[in-house]
């Protein structure tokens, strides 16, 4: 089976992997010039860096790897240090935006790891892949969700990063692979705002994993609700999952009696007895359908009244029970009848 999987790899894939590890055999002069570029970035001196790159002998080494220990490119170094101006200079001089280091990490990944929002934004504007490298087990979204960096997480999702991404792990770790998604990580580490942002951008509130084949291989896959209850997450996490359409019948409450958050358990039990309102079901259905066709990001462009748009985007949640019925009572009698009879 291992041989079969290897045969699926193309020659280009193998060449790419070896190119990550192969040390370039530069002559002594080129190596010295490459170190000079790295020194300029290390000193965070964009003026000096720009003057170096104005010469062809330095510009052709803009993607050269250098430095003590693990060699890195100047762009990767600037991203990890948060040197925004140096990063801009390098991008303007045709530095490869998604170049990999020996760990198969992109400059964007290292900028996310360091929490350098401005560098993250600049790299994304320059065309960096928001999902990072396919050769790395982790992704920028997983990193941002674990660290609780809401601004970086939102920026990545705005540029098309997948909110249901999972770690790239071997088949024998299937159960781990489904419980390490961004929602799981933000819940376990207590990052409520990251949790909410992921749900707003279409994260699956049940498993945070859309790989049906992977789920079928697991005897008892754990939902996000299960994880929140097990780890004693705040009730706000459970309420958000319920509001965004999580299946409240999947967790086994009888098995979960020993879970520490009794308030969350009671909330879940109430929602099992009392079905969602028609308004809530309509919102969940609309958002789910827009996600299926890849248009969830355009929800604010729907030709509906602003008050309804805000409801679809979960703004001012507490006010809608009173605002929406009064708004539609005079304008849309049929809609008001539905609200009154739900």
Image (cartoon, rainbow, N blue to C red):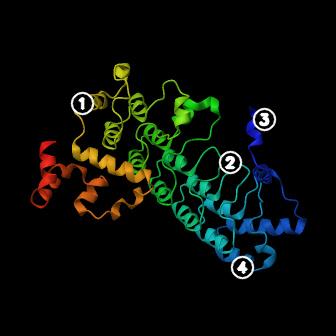
Q: Earlier in the sequence, mark 4 or mark 2?
A: 4
Q: Residue at x 35, y 59 (%)?
A: 299
Q: Which residue is mark 2?
A: 135
Q: Which residue is mark 3?
A: 3
Question: What is the C-alpha distance between the residues marked 1 and 4?
Answer: 67 Å
Q: Earlier in the sequence, mark 4 or mark 3?
A: 3
Q: Nearer the viewer, residue 213 or 325?
A: 213
Q: Residue at x 47, y 52 (%)?
A: 149
Above or below, 115 against 274 in this view is below
x, y percentage for residue 192? 38, 45
Q: Is residue 243 left or right of residue 98?
A: left
What number is the disc on residue 270? 1
Q: Earlier in the sequence, mark 1 or mark 4?
A: 4
Q: Quadrant of residue 255?
A: top left
Q: Earlier in the sequence, mark 3 or mark 2?
A: 3
The crowd level at tag 1 (other Cα within 10 Å; few <14, some 14-19, many 20+) is few
The crowd level at tag 3 (other Cα within 10 Å; few <14, some 14-19, many 20+) is few
Disc 1 versus disc 3: nearer the observer = 3
Quarter in which the C terminus is drawn: top left
Q: How many marks?
A: 4
Q: Secondary structure at mark 3?
A: helix
x, y percentage for residue 221? 48, 29
Q: Which residue is mark 4?
A: 51
x, y percentage for residue 105? 66, 52
């Amino acid at each position: 089976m291992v041989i079969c999987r290897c045969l699926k790899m193309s020659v280009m894939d193998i060449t790419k992997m070896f190119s990550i590890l192969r040390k370039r055999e530069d002559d002594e002069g080129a190596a010295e010039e490459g170190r000079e570029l790295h020194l300029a970035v290390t000193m965070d001196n964009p003026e000096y860096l720009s003057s170096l790159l104005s010469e062809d002998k330095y510009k052709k080494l803009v993607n050269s790897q250098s430095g003590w220990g693990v060699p890195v490119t100047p762009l990767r170094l600037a991203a990890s240090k948060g040197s925004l101006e140096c990063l801009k200079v390098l991008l303007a001089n045709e530095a490869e935006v998604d170049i990999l280091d020996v760990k198969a990490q992109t400059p964007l990944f290292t900028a996310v790891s360091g929490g350098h929002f401005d560098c993250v934004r600049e790299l994304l504007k320059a065309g960096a892949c928001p999902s990072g490298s396919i050769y790395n087990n982790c992704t920028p979204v997983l990193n941002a969700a674990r660290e609780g960096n809401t601004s970086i997480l939102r920026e990545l999702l705005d540029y098309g990063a997948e909110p249901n991404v999972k770690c790239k792990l071997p088949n024998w770790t299937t159960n781990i692979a489904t419980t390490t998604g961004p929602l799981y990580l933000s819940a376990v580490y207590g990052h409520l705002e990251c949790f909410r942002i992921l749900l707003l951008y279409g994260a699956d509130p049940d498993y945070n994993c859309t790989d049906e084949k992977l789920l079928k291989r697991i005897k008892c896959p754990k939902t996000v609700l299960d994880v929140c209850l097990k780890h004693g997450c705040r009730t706000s996490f459970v309420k958000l999952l319920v509001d965004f359409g999580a299946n409240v019948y999947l967790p086994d409450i009888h098995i979960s009696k020993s879970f520490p958050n009794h308030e969350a358990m009671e909330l879940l039990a109430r929602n099992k007895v009392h079905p969602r309102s028609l308004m809530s079901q309509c919102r969940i259905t609309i958002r789910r359908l827009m996600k299926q066709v890849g248009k969830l990001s355009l929800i604010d462009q729907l030709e509906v009244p602003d008050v309804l748009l805000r409801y679809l985007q979960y703004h001012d949640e507490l006010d809608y029970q009173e605002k929406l019925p009064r708004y539609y009572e005079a304008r849309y009698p049929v809609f008001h009848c539905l609200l009154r009879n739900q």
